[in-house]
Amino acid sequence: MIALIQRVSQASVTVNGEIIGEIEKGLLVFLAIEPLDNEQKAKRLAERVAGYRVFNDENDKMNLNVKQAEGNILVVSQFTLAADTSSGMRPSFTTAAKPEFSNHLYQFFVTQLRDKGFDVPTGEFAADMKVALINDGPVTFTLTI
């Protein structure tokens, strides 16, 4: 399971010309599911995302998590993060999980974050989405479980 997290001052996701999810200050999470992932891994990744300290404290050090920084989390599914790019000039997606399995774990991951008190707007699984963001920093990390 892979989460590309970006600290943002704002982010939104649009499907068919309509904004379906948006946040101001917080984390934009692009999430990819791999074949050997499971609910335990999704739960652990949600804990890491919620607790990851990437917001600055009063001493300008990355020492606050998204809740402490009074931010929110926008989650967007992105199977391309699971691509095998180790050779050739075209990515292979054999390392990404099948859509039905991925959607289940994607929804489970979102529920885990909501259970932690976040609103968690989302993209639409498997849709053609347009994602807009202002990366704050820029600050971007890849978390894997």
Image (cartoon, rainbow, N blue to C red):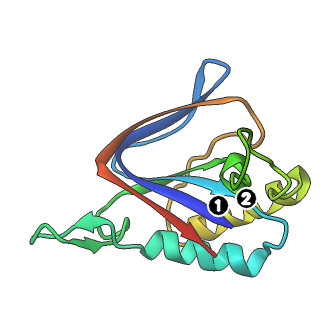
The picture places residue 89, in percent across and down from the top left corner, at: 71, 39
Q: Residue furthest left?
A: 59
The picture places residue 64, in percent across and down from the top left corner, at: 28, 72
Between marks 2 and 1 in the image, the one whose residue lies nearer the viewer: 2
Please give the label number shown on residue 106.
2
Mark 2 touches mark 1? (CB < 8 Å):
yes
Counting the numbered discs, the total is 2
Judging by the rendered image, the residue that carries numbered circle 1 is 110
Element type at mark 2: helix
Q: Is residue 112 left or right of residue 37?
A: left
On the image, which quarter does residue 91 sit in? top right
Residue 131 in the image: above or below residue 104: above
> Quadrant location of the C terminus?
bottom right
What kind of residue is marked 1?
Val
Q: At 64% across and 56% down in the image, what residue appears?
A: 31
Towards the viewer: 135 or 83:
83
Residue 44 in the image: above or below residue 129: below
